[in-house]
Image (cartoon, grey):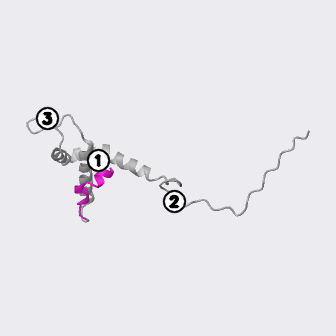
Amino acid sequence: MVAARNDDAVTALSEEASDEERALVFAKAIAKIAILDWDGVGDTEGNAIKPSPEHIDALLDIYPVFEAFQLRYVSKGLLLDAEKNVSAPLPNGSSAWAQATAQPVKKRAKTARAKSTGR
């Protein structure tokens, strides 16, 4: 997902780009990284074609294909990415700047007395 966010087409999107346009460009960037091979994809004569950036773009321009890729691949990756951002960083690691949530104690607790056994 990180590599796709830095894709030239993604970073070139204008501020005015619609959500749909952003989703398509982002899905294409992910697909170009993720798709290494495929079955059942061919040209108009029925000849099998290999994945290439141009072929991936053309395939994802077909709305049902884009929608299926978006639901089955992109959305799951985004969910996983969001989940990893929920946990606070470790205090001795990358989260050294995280704020503490526990309040400091006002005074020390008393030591517990040893229980008498009665012997």
- Residue 45 sits in which quadrant? top left
Tell me which numbered mark, 1 or 3, is placed earlier along the sequence. 3
Question: Relative to 2, does residue 46 appear above or below in the rendering?
Answer: above
- Residue 20 in the figure: left or right of residue 95: left
* Whole-number angstrom distance, CA of label 3 to CA of label 2: 53 Å
The secondary element bearing badge 2 is classed as loop
Mark found first going from the N terminus, 3 or 2: 3
Real-space CA distance between mark 1 and mark 3, rounded to the nearest whole angstrom: 23 Å
Percent x, y for residue 44?
9, 39
Residue that numbered label 1 is attached to: 70
Q: Position of residue 95 (x, y in %)?
A: 49, 56
Q: Is residue 83 above or below residue 101?
A: above
Q: Is residue 51 left or right of residue 78?
A: left
Q: Which class describes the residues within 10 Å of circle 3: few (<14), some (14-19), or many (20+)? A: few
Residue type at the position of mark 3: Ala
Which residue is found at the position 23% from the left and 54% from the top? 25
| Residue at the outermost bottom position | 15
- In this figure, which residue is indicated by the disc labeled 2? 98
Quadrant in which the C terminus is drawn: top right
State which region is magenta.
Answer: 1-14
| Residue 81 versus residue 49 in the image, above or below | below
Query: Residue extending furthest left?
Result: 45
Q: CA distance from mark 2 to mark 1?
A: 34 Å
Residue 107, given in percent of the width and then of the height, sits at 72, 62
Q: Regarding mark 1 in the picture, which secondary structure is present there?
A: helix
Badge number at residue 48: 3
Q: Secondary structure at mark 3?
A: loop
Q: Residues within 10 Å of mark 1 (few under 14, many from 20)?
A: many
The residue type indicated by label 1 comes to: Gln
Q: Nearer the viewer, residue 47 or 115?
A: 115
